[in-house]
Amino acid sequence: MVRFILSKFFYMIVSLFILISVTFVLMKAIPGNPFMSEKAVPPSIQQHLMAKYGLDKPLYEQYLKYLGNLARGDFGISMKMKDQGVSDLIWGSFGPSLRLGIIAIVVSIVVGIGLGMLAALYHRKLIDNVAMILAVIGMSVPSFVLASLLQFYLAQKAGIFKVMGLNGPLDYVLPVMALSAQPIAFIARLARSSMLEVLHSEYIKTAKAKGLAWPIIMWRHVIRNGIMPVVTYVGPMTANIITGSVVIEQIFGIGGLGKIFVSSISNRDYTLIMGVTIFYGIILMVARLLTDIAYAFIDPRIKLSKGKEG
Amino acid sequence: MKKKSMLALLTLLLIAGTVLAACGSVKKTASSGKSGEVAPAAEQVFRINFSSEPPTLDPGIAQDNAAITVLHAMYEGLTNVDSSGKSIPGVAETWDISQDGKTYTFHLRKDAKWSNGDPVTANDFVFAWDRALKPDLASPYAYQLYYVKNAQAYNEGKITDASQVGVKAVDDYTLEVQLENATPYFLNLTSFVTYFPVHKSVKDNEKWAADPSTMIVNGPFKLTNWTKGASLELVPNENYWDKKDIKLTKIQISIVNSGATELASYRSGQLDFAGKPVGEIPADQIDAVKKELPSELSIKGVATTYYYLFNVTAKPFDNVKIRRALTMAIDRQKLVSQVTKGGELPAFGFVPPGIIGEKQEFRTEHKDTDLLSENVDQAKQLLAEGLKEEGLTAFPKVTLTYNTGENHKKIAQAITDMWKTNLGIDVTLENQEWGVFLENRRNLNYQIARAGWGADYNDPMSFLDIFTSTSGNNDTGFKNAEYDSLVKQAYASNDAKTRMDAMNKAEQILIKDNNVIMPIYYYSNTALIKPYVKGVIIDYAGNIFFDRAYIEK
Amino acid sequence: MEQVDEKNVVEHLKPENFQKIGVDEKQAEIIQRESLSAWRDSWERLKSNKFAMTGLTVLILIVIMAIIGPMISPHNYYSNDLYNTNQPPSADHWFGTDDLGRDMFVRTWMGARISLLVGVAAALIDLFIGVIYGGIMGYFGGRVDAIMNKFSEVLYSIPYLLVTILLLVVLEPSLWTIILAIGITGWINMSWIVRGEIMQLKTREYVLASRSMGAGSARLLFRHLIPNAMGPIIVTLTLTVPNAIFSEAFLSFLGLGVQAPIASWGSMINDALTGWMYYPWRMLFPAFFISLTMLAFNIFGDGLRDALDPKLKK
């Protein structure tokens, strides 16, 4: 187990290094610089700015310097949000995104698996149809449409919730609903589909024939096997929810990481782009790692120590 | 089967339980949160939304609207500007101007104090200006100080001796400023953020402007809280010399980049102000707002022009007749009344209304309709002639480039449709990401491009000097010796009539003779203000001031 | 079978432990159903599924409308009528008009063309790259899996916006560029799902059986493993289509989508988003057709899953 995690960790570092290098090159390949505006900055001031942030150096030198700073844990200073450290900016805006994300993930998993199980157990029955119609609706309505509908009816008209901000616990309800609708629907469908498969499989029939108690069959076989594809999806979903709530954050006026990321790109705020990319990359890789570990726990046939050779 | 349904029931209960538990815990704390809220009337709280966050609150380097708005509440320059654009005393009580208009002597008020109690002295201004000009601060707005003698050379590193820069403290309360040229609008500039004083304590702290506790200010308000990406909060500065005129006890600024959310928030009573210049009312809701909240809607013209640029260095727009044809073939009135709808005015010139001329507004003295008129038949003829001159049988493939924005997109679509209807030509649209767009425009890598220009100070020069052949903002490739010399003439003169005549002629060369740009409209500032909020000022250039606002319920 | 545990069976049943005695391709064919009839079989089952057939019919209708819709209206998708903006549906404008007075009916079906194209293209990329890549990762495992997995992980972590902006700068901004931008990372999710499924399936008895009969890796993967993973693949695919459509909408939201005056369903919804409470038809029609398309895709996908599922064969 330790060896497994260590080797995964080593791979993570290598992946991060590649990610950093690729992003660095991509970022610099895009036209523009952090100091552009409608009103042009005189050339001499442009030079001062470039010199101040080391952008006048050759690309490889900038790259090496960045790596060097990074190795010391220094993410640098934002080029647009002057005098603010990149790590401060990331941590500051990550809070709301993280809280929102975790709630949305928990809600998605619990409600999604629950709905999926119900639908699978009552295959082709009313509950199945209702659950799947809900799932299809959840999946068919774009999240930003859902968000603005919720905002209009529940906040602006009914006044139950605040239109914007994330100051009280009640303020989480609408964004979480908007964020989790699609994952709920997807998880429900995925869970239903794979559980149906399991329910129809020979070993369940065997188990039933053996006279095994239904809850035991359910737990040992149906849920554990049926949940596999869901687990696969939870990794990317986690990253998606935590990182990809840009539009929802914008609609509900939440200053999250997504917002900072999009604006860092349009501002060509190089240090911030790198910082957020690395941060996202780590979240994503950790989520994938946890997925792999979870796999091993749920499905004992998959060995952690070594993948099976064909 | 029975067991199966039991399990189903269990699952259902689990889901319901989670949801209920979530709701339950939410409700409990929500009620306690609500008790903290107080009605705005008693507390004199002003709540406004910004669509973008100030990147910095350092007056030496700030250059965007959001930062400038907050800094106006936190600092005070030598002069202030009233709503009509006239300069009124600020930290300077009086001033003398020399005969040649090149030396300004400011007499500072003795009761002006920093928020920590220190007196505001002439040295604070010298320190601030010197700081903004130092090459190593790399202030992008340092050029706002270039009017001061030797400021540009010092900023460019050509001279390193700070004492050669034309600003000095004669004594603690007298500031003497030498200028490069007579600059009739200099008093206007001294109310601008780059000219604000800065407390000397910032010298040793690079990150002072990001942290409310290290920001020592001299204006009516001070920052108490800045939650990055979410909100700012200001309270009155106890040491401000004119604190008796400050009624608000708190200014709450939220940062939300969505016009729809901002408006919804305003409607639900979470904001006291919505819309420009710092926020936005979605164009699609302006009709509804006009109908539903007519008494709260404020529409005011501001000195900014929306226009299209032609790349005059490349075919087919190196031909003036083709440029003129396109310029003449659109219906600006229809565009502003049916598309933008925000009370904008059709533009036929570059200098917008609100800019002061010789005696009255420049636009009143020199009508823009003399520069340009709309005429479809004439446009058709001009286009045919132009194409012939270019040796073309048909209108070539042309692209109109604009940067991302709902409004820009709508306008571009409406205008290309007018060209198609009126001239029978197809112009392709290309939307580009902001940075890419600017880069392409600057490198003349376009055919027709969107542009907008607002006043930095109240003088036509703020507009006309961008199309000189050496200007870094001339993104058209237009080079005209006569135009350059007219702008130079206006720069050098201290006589209002000479200046205005020269600039009028320059504008004629730019638009009437050469059609380098296609003016579309003069901006307006559309905002919603709650009826109980008084004293919010929006000036000629569309800057908002709420430092002297108050709540009356 | 003897009392050996599963692991030992796997080890014993490695191909090199067996002698090939006259097992050739032809004979391998015999151990599974004839493939043409298998497809016909599935088709028969699909036909008998009313839900699925309804879904298919709706999809076909939408495609037909996307093709002929713009032709049966007297209006076109770009002409403005600035004095008739934001008009509700009427006899002249069946779906109303938008903020520039353009006919929403024509625009909706022009939008359908773009959105469907983007969705289908993304699904194809998913199917070809995602499934094969994931299949190989899951099947071979070990080093191959580790390297391929890392590669997809890095690719997935690269900020999508950077790639898109760069693509749009480097290539001409066009629909194909957008499809490329969506496709370039879109398949990764699918590959992970397939990988997970295959990892699980490859230990199943029938795989062992097939392998022991001398089936090669490619044959195992494409004839046995992937068809058995069809359930999750189709479910994921039915999500890829809306995701791609929404991705395009998100790109429009950031100004990187299709160029005006051409619109997609996503960009139409975006345009309508700020004023939908006053002009609901501007959001309703594109949103309704996105949802209808998704619904149709979903129930058809479900039917397809059931029809293709080898385990349901009698």
Image (cartoon, coloured by chain):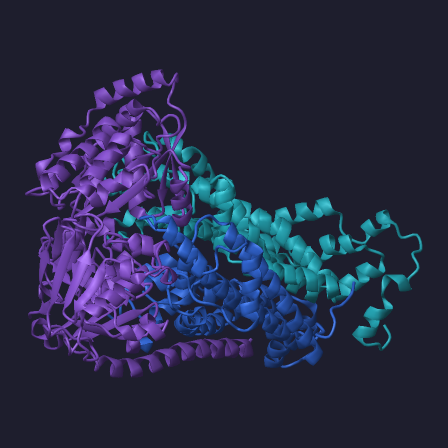
Residue B411: x and y in percent read 28, 40
Q: Nearer the viewer, residue B21 or B321?
A: B321
Q: In the picture provided, is B298 more to the left or to the right than C137?
A: left
Q: How many marks?
A: 0
Quarter occupied by residue A207: bottom right
Residue B386 seen: yes
Name the colour assigned to chain B in the rendering.
purple
Q: Is residue C236 above or below residue B15?
A: above
Can you say whether B366 is above or below B110 in the image?
A: above
Which residue occupies 57% across, 71% down?
A71
Coordinates of residue B324 in the picture (x, y in percent): 26, 26
Chain in blue colour: A
Lateral position of residue A273 relative to residue B382, left or right: right
Q: Position of residue B46 (x, y in %)?
A: 16, 69
State the image coordinates of residue B476 (x, y, percent, origin top left): 34, 36
Left or right: B308, with A121 as reference point: left
Q: Colour of chain C?
A: cyan
